[in-house]
Image (cartoon, helix red, strand yellow):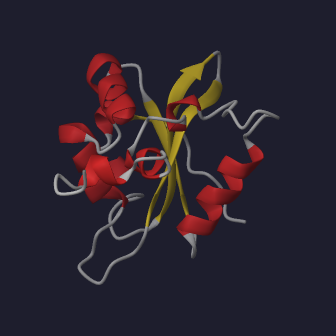
Amino acid sequence: MANWSDCRKFDEFQYDENRKILVGRAGVYQFGYFIYGEFRPKYIGRVLWTPKGYDLYQRFIKYKNNAHNPKVAAKIVAQRKMLWFRVMSVEDPAWTESRFLLADRDEQGNFITFEWNSIGSNYYDDYYKEDWRSFYSASYQ
């Protein structure tokens, strides 16, 4: 498996030295805190390569402006100066992300490390609710 990049401040991802590890790359990323010399991730996400050039940098721009995950968006807005990130370029980001998430569950299915990925944090979780169609279709009643 590939290695994680060095931890970097999220607020500085647009600097040239940080852009070079993000532009043109697909992979997985983690947001979290750097405490006492140790990175403590709270969220893991993925970026799949697209022919139009969607990459880690474009995803971070989305997070800076308005993340699709409301829990992460709130954390980024409130704690932008304290938030750190790291990335890993891999051939199959979806598989890599799923391995990390599967390994991070306790007996009840709750996330241990990646608490921002918890139930109710994004539309994937809403999809699995019993009446998920009502979230996405006004015509379904």
Residue nearest the observer in this picture, 7 or 60: 60
Residue 137 seen anywhere in this rendered image of the structure: yes
- In the image, farthest residue toward the front: 141
Residue 14 seen anywhere in this rendered image of the structure: no
Residue 9 spot, x, y in % from top left:
40, 32
Residue 102 spot, x, y in % from top left:
72, 50
Residue nearest the observer in this picture, 20 or 65: 65
Residue 25 spot, x, y in % from top left:
41, 68
Looking at the rendered structure, the number of numbered marks drawn on it comes to 0
Q: Residue at x 57, y 76 (%)?
A: 91
Q: Residue at x 43, y 52 (%)?
A: 127
- In the image, farthest residue toward the right: 107
Q: Tell whether 97 sits left or right of 134.
A: right
Q: Residue at x 56, y 24 (%)?
A: 34
- The quarter in which the N terminus is drawn is bottom right
In the displayed structure, 84 sits above or below 82; it is: below
Q: Tell whether 135 sits left or right of 5.
A: left
Residue 78 spot, x, y in % from top left:
30, 17
The quarter of the displayed image where residue 48 is located: bottom left
Q: Tell whether 114 sits left or right of 86.
A: right
The quarter of the displayed image where residue 58 is located: bottom left
Q: Residue at x 41, y 47 (%)?
A: 131
